[in-house]
Image (cartoon, rainbow, N blue to C red):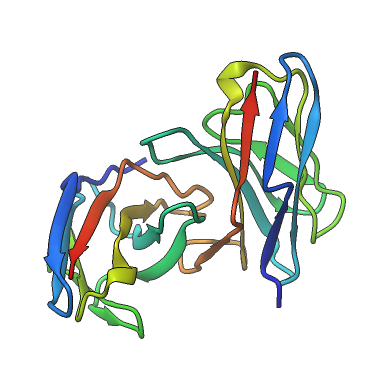
Amino acid sequence: DAKTTQPNSMESNEEEPVHLPCNHSTISGTDYIHWYRQLPSQGPEYVIHGLTSNVNNRMASLAIAEDRKSSTLILHRATLRDAAVYYCILRDAPYGNKLVFGAGAILRVKS
Amino acid sequence: NAGVTQTPKFQVLKTGQSMTLQCAQDMNHEYMSWYRQDPGMGLRLIHYSVGAGITDQGEVPNGYNVSRSTTEDFPLRLLSAAPSQTSVYFCASSYSKGSLMNTEAFFGQGTRLTVV
């Protein structure tokens, strides 16, 4: 399974943008990049995913480097509710049967 | 839609007891899976199923059994509980057309299990 590397933790101020980085230098050409987050005492929640192009949805944006060896999850205006552990995960080809969770990155949001 | 429902939410077992953690989804998803999460760690895959009648082992399958007789239900059985199985257990489901690469997973709220 291809691996990802994230910072252990990050801190942001409320209503400011947050950029969460992820390195995945061993990614293969057909692996999708997925992001999930886990709020305290809850199950993981899907955030966004992409293959090559940048992606936007109502929760966040995903910026993927041209060589695909890194990506950045962008929360445009952090709220207290965004405080969570964020997981950057690669869905391995060909079937993506396994979501391999690392330790993730803790995001703290200050009011 | 209820999504993914896990029962019970909390359970305390004595060493050696057996029990079944229930997981049901109402989204007609073919793919279902079980994870465990130990304190301060990410989730680890226990077992998964790509459809009714088909199951496979994940990263940490020892001490657990699964079966998939219907699309909706994917129970996880602990055969003889051990303190090392104290953990939070999450069930997840995904829509699958043969590949999960381009799909999202829906998780339940978890079952917090303590084995004493």
Residue at the spot 71% in from the left edge and 78% down from the top edge: B1
Residue at the spot 62% in from the left edge and 28% down from the top edge: B114
Give left or right: position of B116 versus A85.
right
Answer above or below: position of A50 versus B33.
Answer: below
In the depicted view, which residue is nearer to us: B112 or A61?
A: B112
Answer above or below: position of A96 versus B39.
Answer: below
Q: Quadrant of residue A35?
A: bottom left
The extreme front residue here reads: A111
Q: In this orientation, does residue B38 appear?
A: yes
The extreme right residue here reads: B69
How many discs appear? 0
x and y, in percent, of residue A75 in the image: 22, 75
Residue at the spot 53% in from the left edge and 50% down from the top edge: A97
Residue at the spot 69% in from the left edge and 66% down from the top edge: B29
Q: Quadrant of residue A38?
A: bottom left
Answer above or below: position of A98 versus B94.
Answer: above
Q: Quadrant of residue B92?
A: bottom right
Give left or right: position of A80 versus A13.
right
x and y, in percent, of residue B63 in the image: 68, 21
x and y, in percent, of residue A3 in the image: 28, 42
Give left or right: position of A37 versus A9.
right
Quadrant into which the C terminus of chain B falls: top right
x and y, in percent, of residue B32 in the image: 66, 54
Q: In this orientation, does residue A50 appear?
A: no
